[in-house]
Amino acid sequence: MGRQPKQPNRQLAELIEETRLSRKGLARRVVERGRAVGIELGYDHTAIARWVSGEQPNPPGPQLIAEVLTEVVGRRVTPADCGMVDSQEPADLGLEFSLSLAEATAAATALWRSDVERRRFLVGASYAVAVYPAASMRWLTMPGPEHPTSGKGYRRIGQSDVDAVRTMTAAFRDLDNRVGGGKVRSTIVHYLHTSVTPLLHGSYPESIGRQLFATVSELTKLAGWAAYDLEEHGLAQRYLIQALRLSRAAGDAALGAEILAAMSHQATYVGRPGDAVDLARAAQIAARTAGLGALESECHIVEAHGHAARSDSSLCASSLNAAERAFDRTDSVRPPWLEYFDDAYLSAKAAHCFRDLGDRARTAHFAERSLDMSEGYTRGRSFNLCLLASARADEDPHEAVRIGSEALTVAAGLESRRTLAYLRDLRHHLTPYAELSDVADFRQQVLALSTQAG
């Protein structure tokens, strides 16, 4: 419950009267405004009545109310004009691809700070459908190179500072793969806020600035990926958009392609396959600029998954073939963040495609190939085991339980909601065989793990 001033909020009452909106109509507009930026609110006409009486809504309420009133009255209205305490940060923080470098730095650092403070508008933020297409369009159309240099900060930033962030990023990346996003996300964000923010506000020449922005982009992308792994989709979007903007500042087309591919990956997962295809195609444009075969292959394979999720087997096959052709090109050097993309990963993504197309035989074939993977990718192994087990469930439920039990053992050391989703999907596939004792035991174990995770 918000705090109660002693006096009614006459400023808000006068503004509402000026709009000629009913209290129900104003509440509906505020709820719609929140939904547009990925925030679900439960306001109705009684909430408006409480605010007019003097109650202060919690953030991001004041900012959203001010934005709605601005639209209706045709002039800028602030939370203070509404007689409300400013929420300090806009509710859509992080959802925009900033036009200027200064705005990009401010948006990224504000996002990290607000996340560390666990600001209410970030906690439980839902997926906003319009923001990825807008961000990718800005990425593609922004003219000319930028010059990430600064002479304003008292601290001079050098190569050793950039190298330190790279080292930490590599460590976080390895941990994310081994233990899941839930065990590393808060640590990554804290490091971004406390250690990286001062670097961006320091003084550095352009040669250092480009490296710094690229490295910070990579780490910001990793924070978004960890949020995605926790199914905190609205928060993941904000991080990935800011990572994309920072990669643009660095002039790193390859990293931009990787981030766009990550956005495509998430879009398919949340049920937006059309957006996933568009994002994958934008990623391909950036990847061709970078000239990395593995990266182009990744961008084609995420497009294939988008087509599969749309049940378009023809376009899926075309994209799969393009992914294989690009993968066959040898890269002399790969950036560290692309080292994961190998034949096993390509096979895993192909298995996802055939799963969504309902082709169990080819799902099993590629899922089995995907298990020939490098050490350290614990979470990925759990996904691939679940894919294989689900594909085998109807043919041999006992074998599916055996494979699934291995996935369950692997998952025990992970904090990853995506892993739980794969296990629950396998549990669902085994439902017709629930009378078998080993199936019943396995289904109970998955239920227990899901309940324990909350």
Image (tube, rainbow, N blue to C red):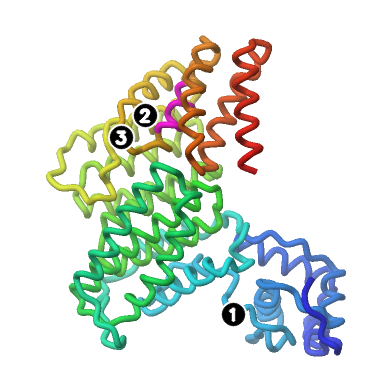
In front here: 344 or 154?
A: 154
User: Circle 2: is it few (<14), some (14-19), or many (20+) Cα within 10 Å?
Assistant: some
**Taking 49 as reference, is 352 left or right?**
left
Secondary structure at numbered mark 3: loop
From the image, tell me which residue sits under label 3. Answer: 375
From the image, tell me which residue sits under label 1. Answer: 88
Q: How many labels does the image show?
A: 3
Q: Earlier in the sequence, mark 2 or mark 3?
A: 2
User: Circle 3: is it few (<14), some (14-19), or many (20+) Cα within 10 Å?
Assistant: few
Q: Distance between the residues labelled 1 and 3?
A: 45 Å
Nearest to viewer (mark 1 / mark 3): 3
Secondary structure at numbered mark 2: helix
**Kind of residue at disc 2:** Ala
Magenta-colored stretch includes residue 387: yes
Residue 317 numbered tag:
2
Residue 290, placed above or below residue 146:
above
Q: Toward which corner of the image does residue 208 lie, by quadrant?
A: bottom left
Nearest to viewer (mark 1 / mark 2): 1
Pointer 1 with pointer 3, Cβ within 8 A: no
Secondary structure at numbered mark 1: loop
At 32% from the left and 53% from the top, the residue drawn is 171
Magenta-colored stretch includes residue 268: no
Residue 286, placed above or below residue 69:
above
**Kind of residue at disc 3:** Glu
Q: What residue range appears in magenta?
A: 381-388
Q: Distance between the residues labelled 2 and 3?
A: 30 Å
